[in-house]
Amino acid sequence: MAIEKRFPLPPFTEETAKEKVQLAEDAWNSQNPEKVSKAYTIDTEWRNRSEFINGREEVVAFLTKKWKQEHNYKLKKDLWAFSDNRIAVRFEYEFQNENGQWFRAYGNENWEFNENGLMKKRYASINDAPINIADKKL
């Protein structure tokens, strides 16, 4: 069995950390749960708001449900800090619920990677704020 690798690999430099953040942003904006899940270890651990998600299968199920509920989703991530095999990001995203109300979600994520560049831990703190369509930024 081939070893899965997801470049760039740790230890991160500022350049490679920014690249990893951009790759994550691009993947999440694809709204393709299978594609997104491939960036994580098979046994990945997440905390997303008050939910705890374990493993790729749960990631796919979580993201499938998320994007059925969050329409016109658009995400922007920014590098906050990095070290050896860890990256912290600040993010915001906008979406509409099934009633057409727009929201902007703000938050921070802490990521930890294995030696092959797959994310083994993702801890996200997120707050949503309703917005008017005229206030959209993304």
Image (cartoon, rainbow, N blue to C red):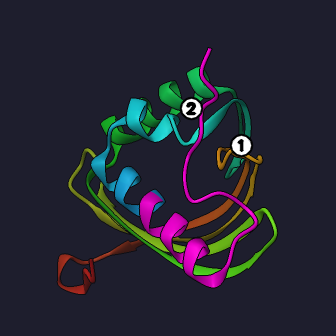
Can residue 128 be seen?
no
> Was residue 74 drawn as part of the magenta stretch in this picture?
no
Residue 41 sits in which quadrant? top right
Q: Position of residue 52 (x, y in %)?
A: 74, 37
Q: Position of residue 18 (x, y in %)?
A: 53, 76
Say above or below: 38 vs 13.
Answer: above
Would you call the spot at circle 2 few (<14 residues within 10 Å), some (14-19), or many (20 or more)? Answer: many
- Nearest the viewer among 134 and 125 is 125
Can residue 14 be seen?
yes
Q: Is residue 18 left or right of residue 103?
A: right
- Nearest the viewer among 106 and 34 is 34
Q: Residue at x 20, y 55 (%)?
A: 100
Circle 1 is placed at which residue position?
A: 46
Q: Position of residue 124 (x, y in %)?
A: 67, 58
Per the image, label 1 sits on a secondary structure element best described as strand
Q: Which residues are magenta?
A: 1-23
Disc 1 residue type (three-letter): Trp
Q: Residue furthest top?
A: 1
Disc 2 residue type (three-letter): Val
> Was residue 9 drawn as part of the magenta stretch in this picture?
yes
Circle 2 is placed at which residue position?
A: 59
Say above or below: 77 vs 23.
Answer: below
User: Do labels 2 and 1 touch, CB within 8 Å?
Assistant: yes
- Nearest the viewer among 17 and 58 is 17
Would you call the spot at circle 1 few (<14 residues within 10 Å), some (14-19), or many (20 or more)? Answer: many
Q: Position of residue 5 (x, y in %)?
A: 59, 40
